[in-house]
Image: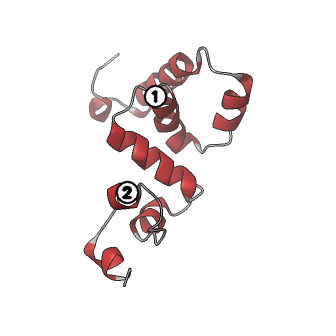
Amino acid sequence: MKNNLKTMNAEERAEANRASFESYSVGRSAEELKFSNTIPSKFRLGWLRSRAGQASPRQMIKSKCQECVGYEEVVKRVGGCRSTICPLWTERPYQNDEADSDQE
């Protein structure tokens, strides 16, 4: 299997994701696995890595913000987040000047 996801074909990426998911699922509680199955597959591996403590702080923040907006319209909703009371607000991903100027 190739090491770089960008050079993999769709089948190789799917297999790599399955293997990663299985490795991060080992040792998880039934409740945690049940919850992880409610996360859209596009976001699930990032969430599992974060829970396993194998993601960078930046990736963990991104995962939490994605969860907070319900995994819907993530870029738009997280970038335009108005929950300034959130301790992660200043560090949230997808920020842009337009979204920040709306905070006033």
Q: Position of residue 53 (x, y in %)?
A: 44, 26
Snapshot quadrant of residue 54: top left
As shown in the figure, which amino acid type bears the numbered disc 2?
A: Arg
Q: Position of residue 81 (x, y in %)?
A: 45, 69
Please state which of the two labelled residues, at mark 1 or mark 2, is closer to the viewer: 2
User: What residue lies at 37% left-to-right and 31% top-to-bottom?
Assistant: 9
Within 10 angstroms of label 1, few (less than 14), some, or many (20 or more) residues?
few
**In front: 38, or 13?**
38
As shown in the figure, which amino acid type bears the numbered disc 1?
A: Glu
Question: Which quadrant of the rendered structure holds the N terminus?
Answer: top left
Contact between labelled residues 2 and 1, with CB atoms less than 8 Å apart: no
**In front: 18, or 26?**
26
Snapshot quadrant of residue 97: bottom left
Residue bearing the label numbered 1:
11
Residue 87's disc is none
Residue 22 higher or lower than 31, as above or below = above
Q: Position of residue 67 (x, y in %)?
A: 55, 50
Question: Which quadrant of the rendered structure holds the C terminus?
Answer: bottom left
User: What residue lies at 52% left-to-right and 21% top-to-bottom?
Assistant: 24
Residue bearing the label numbered 2:
92
Earlier-in-chain disc, 1 versus 2: 1
Residue 72 higher or lower than 29, as above or below = below
User: What residue lies at 59% left-to-right and 45% top-to-bottom?
Assistant: 40
Q: Position of residue 43 (x, y in %)?
A: 51, 43
Spatial separation of the CA atoms under disc 1 and disc 2: 32 Å
User: What residue lies at 46% left-to-right and 28% top-to-bottom?
Assistant: 11
**In front: 32, or 12?**
32
Within 10 angstroms of label 2, few (less than 14), some, or many (20 or more) residues?
many
Secondary structure, mark 1, is helix
Residue 55 higher or lower than 96, as above or below = above
